[in-house]
Amino acid sequence: MARNKKTSESLFKFMNLLIALLMKNGQYRTMLHYKATLNSFKRYRDNKDIALDKIDAEVMRSYEAYLHHTAKVCSNTSSFYLRILRATYNKAVTKGLTPQQYPFKEVYTGIAQTSKRAIPTEDVSQIKGLESVRELTPKEEMARDTFLMSFYLRGISFIDLAHLRKSDLKDGYLHYTRSKTGQRLTIRWEKEMQDLLEKYQAQTVTSPYLFPFLVDDGNQRQDKTIDKMKAKVRQYHNTEARITYHLRKLGAKMGIRGKLTLYVARHSWATAARDNDISISVISEALGHHSELTTQIYLRSIKSSEVDDANAKILSVL
C-alpha cells in the first residue's frame, strides 16, 4: 500500500494516471489537454519528476516565467497549462496525497479575450464555388468540404464532426452532444449537408461514422484497451492537422486574409447570423452556448476584429 501511495505522490506519475483514466472514459479532448500540459511541464523540469508536496507558489511562478520567456507562449496558453496543473493538484489534495499549499495564488489563471476572426459570407460562397478539380488538389477539396460542413452545421467543432455516427442522423435531423460542454444539439438536415454527405458515402460504407475522417474496424465498442484508444486519438489528431494544413493552403491560394481554419467557419456562421438580424437567443442556442452572455462576449470579440480591419483599411489609404 505504501508503495502505491508513493507512486501517486509524484506529479508526473499522478498525471499519467489521470490521463489513462480520461482515455478509458473516452474524454479524448481533455486527455490531449492534460498530455500537452504534462509534456510542457516536463520540458520545464528537464524531465525530472517532482513530489506533489514540493509544488509551491515559487515553483509555479518559475514555471510561468519559463512559459513566457523561454517557451514564448501567449498568456492564454500559459494560463491554460496552469489551470490544468491546478485541477491536477486539487485532485491530489482531495485524495489526500498532498496538503493544500495554494501554489497557484500568484500566477495568472484567467482567460484573456482574444480576437476571433470571421470571413464574409461572400468568401464562404467563393469557397463553396470552387467545384473544379483543376482548382483544387484532392486534399484541398477534402479540407474545403470539411470547412463547409462545419459552417453548415452551425460551426460544429472538428472533434464533434469527426465522431458523428450514422445513427446520429434520424428522420431529417442530426442529434449530437458537444464534447466541449456536454450539451445536446439538434440540427435540421438540409440539402447542402446531404450533398456533401453523399459525396463521401462510398468511403464510409463499412464505417459507423458519417464522414471518412476516422477508420473503425468494427470492434471499437468492445475493444477498450489503452493501445486501441491511443491509436484512435492519434488518428484523429493526425487527420485534424492534415485538414488544418490544407485549409490554410487553400485560404492562401484564394487570397483570404488571415489563416483559414475551422474556427473561422464557426465565427463566420455566428457573424452571418448576426448580420441577418438573428436574435442573440437563437444564435446562443445554435452555437451551444450555456448563456446569452457568453454569446454576447463571443460576438463582441468578432466585432473587435472587424473594427481593427476597418481601421487598417482607412490607414492604408493615407
Image: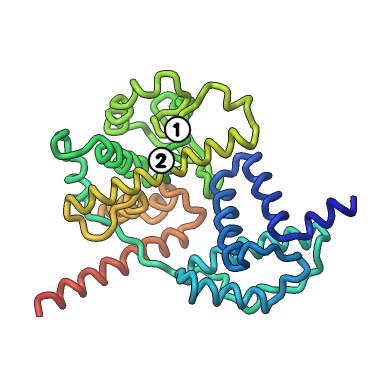
Q: Which of 10 and 309 is in front in this view?
A: 10
Residue 317 percent across, percent down from the top left: 9, 76
Task: Please give the residue where the numbered disc 2 appears in the rendered image.
Answer: 239
Which color mode does the image show? rainbow
Between 46 and 283, the one lying in front of the other is 46
Q: In this view, does 193 lie above or below 11?
A: above
Residue 278 visible, this orientation:
no
Kindly give the residue lying farthest to the right in the view shown.
1
Residue at the (40%, 67%) spot, across then down: 114
Q: Earlier in the sequence, mark 1 or mark 2?
A: 1
Instruction: Name the residue rendered at 47%, 38% in the picture.
Output: 235
Picture quadrant where residue 37 is located: bottom right
Whether residue 43 is situated above or below residue 186 in the rendered picture: below
Q: Name the residue under label 1.
A: 214
Residue 237 on image: x %, y %: 46, 44
Q: Which amino acid does label 1 sit on?
A: Leu
**How many neighbours does mark 2 have within 10 angstroms: few (below 14), some (14-19), or many (20 or more)?**
some
Residue 188: x %, y % from top left: 38, 34
Q: What element carries label 2?
A: helix
- At x 13% / y 36%, what residue is drawn? 134
| 297 left or right, relative to 260 | right
Residue 222 percent location from the top left of the image: 63, 25
Circle 2: residue type: Thr
Q: Do the residues labelled 1 and 2 touch (CB within 8 Å)?
A: yes
Which residue corresponds to the image point at 46% horizontal and 48% vertical from the top-left? 288
Cα distance between the residues tagged 1 and 2? 8 Å
Q: Residues within 10 Å of mark 1 (few under 14, many from 20)?
A: some
